[in-house]
Image: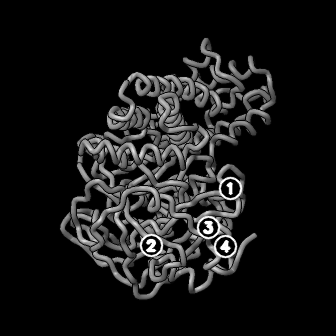
Amino acid sequence: MTSDNLDSLHFDNRFTRDLPADPVTTNHTRQVHRACFSRVQPTQVAAPQLVAFSREMAERIGLSEQAARSPEFAQVFAGNRLLPGMDPFAMCYGGHQFGNWAGQLGDGRAINLGDVLTSGGEHWTLQLKGAGKTPYSRHADGLAVLRSSVREFLCSEAMHHLGVPTTRALSLVLTGEKVMRDMFYDGNPQWEPGAIVCRMSPSFTRFGNFQIFAARKDVETLRQLVDFTIRTDFPHLGDPSSPAVLAAWFEEICRTTVDMILHWMRVGFVHGVMNTDNMSILGLTIDYGPYGWLEDFDPGWTPNTTDAQGRRYCFGNQPQIALWNLSQLGNALVPIFGDPEPLNRGLELYSRRFNEGWRTLSAQKLGLREYVPETDLDLTNDLHELLPLVETDMTIFYRRLADLPMLSDASQTEDTLFAGLADAYYVPDQLTPEYRQRMTAWLGQYRARLQQQGELDAARRERMNRVNPKYVLRNYLAQLAIDKAEQGDFSLVEELLEVLRRPYDEQPEKERFAEKRPDWARSRAGCSMLSCSS
């Protein structure tokens, strides 16, 4: 059942009720000690205007479409009006940024409005991103601009429909005000339209929430946070004072984290800023900044201009960075565990599960029913060596591979099969005779493996198309939507949201959204690499 009345939302604010609060109530930048959060009010804005909303998430918390399209909804989710029961706060946390301990960070431009308790017993934290300064804003203004907000809103929902664990987005609202941003960090800031995304998650607790108290040797608050997290986010594990429950908790964090990473690798997603403060304790993708999808299959690609030199957070590094981040979380939890052995077991579980999952995933992407090491190790390794040699669109390659008549048409030669992959290549001149020979040889190897499997092409195609998406939120598509939205036309935001609800389906009328990146987007701002301001 949904309601047209926003006041019908029921709030059960466990985080602010059960954990220590910052005793200082004034909103000024400061170091916050022995507190998990600071209460803070969103900044009032001039003229809230709804750009888009997720009907699924509105329904999830019991709101009707009529409620979401009401003027009151825009007021609430721009931060201008608090509903009864809301208790706004910003979290205190620290983190490693690009491998270096950064000390206190916290919710610098995010304000949690409160936890909605649904009729089905679910807790959903509503969080405004871009709603103004908090004690953790440091030198920033706590605001967000339309371009970054469009990207966050669309990507949160796109990832969910891809089957990737993620935080969600309820709404995207223009504030009616301008925000100054230096998009390229080149000393040329510009005024841009301000906007706010309402993000939703069962919890926004991050690795960094635990790290800050460990770094300050505040074991008492650390223990409170651990107990609270297990009781509220992992209640199925049992008593948080039990060493066995603590061990099971860390193992579950490692398991959900590795599963998230495997999904990223499956769809070609690159997060771009895998700092420990951007890692969810629930194994959810969180904080969509300079992200991107692999277009040219380059394991060394990062969408983050800040990371262009070191490429710490490039596509191929994501599995090992997640393990490194889990190690830092484990270090923070040693004062609670006492014995580091259960933490080490969790990290070993991560490595084992990733290796097994990666093999299975690689086979699934090729439509294989199971992974057979004797044949499939070379088959998948050879393909992963071939794809980066020329500019190959990852998403299109796997969809075209699924369409090839590998067994049903005996007249197909390797050369004609290779021609069926042509749409996936960006620069035809790169397809040298040597490369063509290697790829056709691989197709022969692939065909032989499929003959062993003994099944019709249609069954293989169906299985491949369940794990290899046709539609992903390419950066150039997001930029086109941003361009229109900045002119007051929100139609492309809505259209992309609708297309990305069915990313694995053939949508003949939407084929233009499945095309590879056009040449004009190679170097245009927002269409390839992005800054942390994006």
Disc 1 + disc 4, Cβ < 8 Å: no
Residue 50 or residue 440, whichever sits in front: 50
In the depicted structure, whether residue 320 falls above or below residue 392: above
In the depicted structure, whether residue 376 falls above or below residue 157: above
Residue wearing tag 3 = 54
Q: Amino acid at mark 1?
A: Arg
Disc 2 + disc 4, Cβ < 8 Å: no
- Closer to the N terminus: mark 4 or mark 3? 3
In the depicted structure, whether residue 208 falls above or below residue 92: above
Mark 1 Cα-neighbour bin, 10 Å: few <14, some 14–19, many ≥20: some
Mark number for residue 196? 2
- Mark 3 and mark 2: span between their CA atoms? 14 Å
Q: How many callouts does the rendering have?
A: 4
- Closer to the N terminus: mark 1 or mark 2? 2
Splitting the image into 4 quarters, where does residue 43 fall?
Answer: bottom left
Q: Amino acid at mark 3?
A: Ser
- Mark 1 and mark 2: span between their CA atoms? 26 Å
Splitting the image into 4 quarters, where does residue 446 fall?
Answer: top right
- Closer to the N terminus: mark 3 or mark 2? 3
Pair 1/2: label in front: 2
Q: Amino acid at mark 2?
A: Ile
Disc 4 + disc 3, Cβ < 8 Å: no
SS at badge 2: strand
SS at badge 4: loop
SS at badge 3: loop
Residue wearing tag 1 = 502
